[in-house]
Image: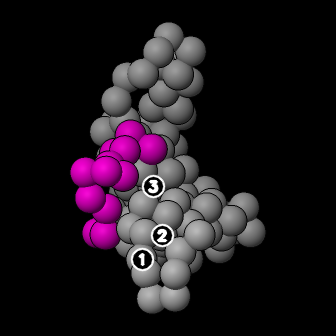
Amino acid sequence: MLDEGEENPSLILKARYGLGYAYFNLQQYDRALFQLQRICIESTNQFSQPGRWNVAFSDCYFVAKAYSDALVYYKKQPRLNAVDNDTRIFKLEIFSAFSATMRGQKAN
């Protein structure tokens, strides 16, 4: 428990992460991205998990139909284990296909 006025940066960042995904689940992607961006700005080495943030950013951008942005962040995700890597490859293919489709539509 924290005393009044006492800050715990790790707890604040974890709360932002939870809030970001709550907004994501409510389909309020702009608010979700804002919380996730604040994490990246405020994080220190003690809470640095860039893979987690890259996945969160890519998921938000994907459902907001910003496929090129989703692809950029998903490519930054580190390879973790075989199961996660299979999911990563699958999502990369989907994001790439959507991004290429959108580029083709903009050209027409």
Residue 15's x, y, as percent?
Answer: 56, 66
Q: Nearer the viewer, residue 4 or 99?
A: 4
Residue drawn at (48%, 70%) of the image? 12
Give the mark toward the camera: 1 or 3.
1
Residue drawn at (29%, 69%) of the image? 41
Q: Which residue is most to the left?
A: 45
Up the image or down, 62 lies above or below 91; here it is below
The numbered dot on residue 12 is 2
Identify the magenta region: 41-52
Give the mark toward the camera: 1 or 2.
1
The disc, 1 or 2, on the residue closer to the chain's N-terminal end is 1
Q: Which residue is most to the top?
A: 82
Amino acid type, label 1: Glu
The numbered dot on residue 57 is 3
The disc, 3 or 2, on the residue closer to the chain's N-terminal end is 2
Residue drawn at (42%, 51%) of the image? 53
For label 3, the SS is: helix
> Can residue 63 be spotted in the picture?
yes
Marks 3 and 2: CB-CB under 8 Å?
A: no
Up the image or down, 80 lies above or below 1; here it is above
Dividing the image into 4 quarters, which one contains the N terminus? bottom right
Q: Nearer the viewer, residue 89 or 51?
A: 51
Marks 1 and 3: CB-CB under 8 Å?
A: no
Report the residue marked by disc 1. Answer: 7
- Is 96 inside the magenta-drawn segment? no
Amino acid type, label 2: Ile
Marks 1 and 2: CB-CB under 8 Å?
A: yes
Q: Which residue is most to the bottom?
A: 5
Amino acid type, label 3: Phe
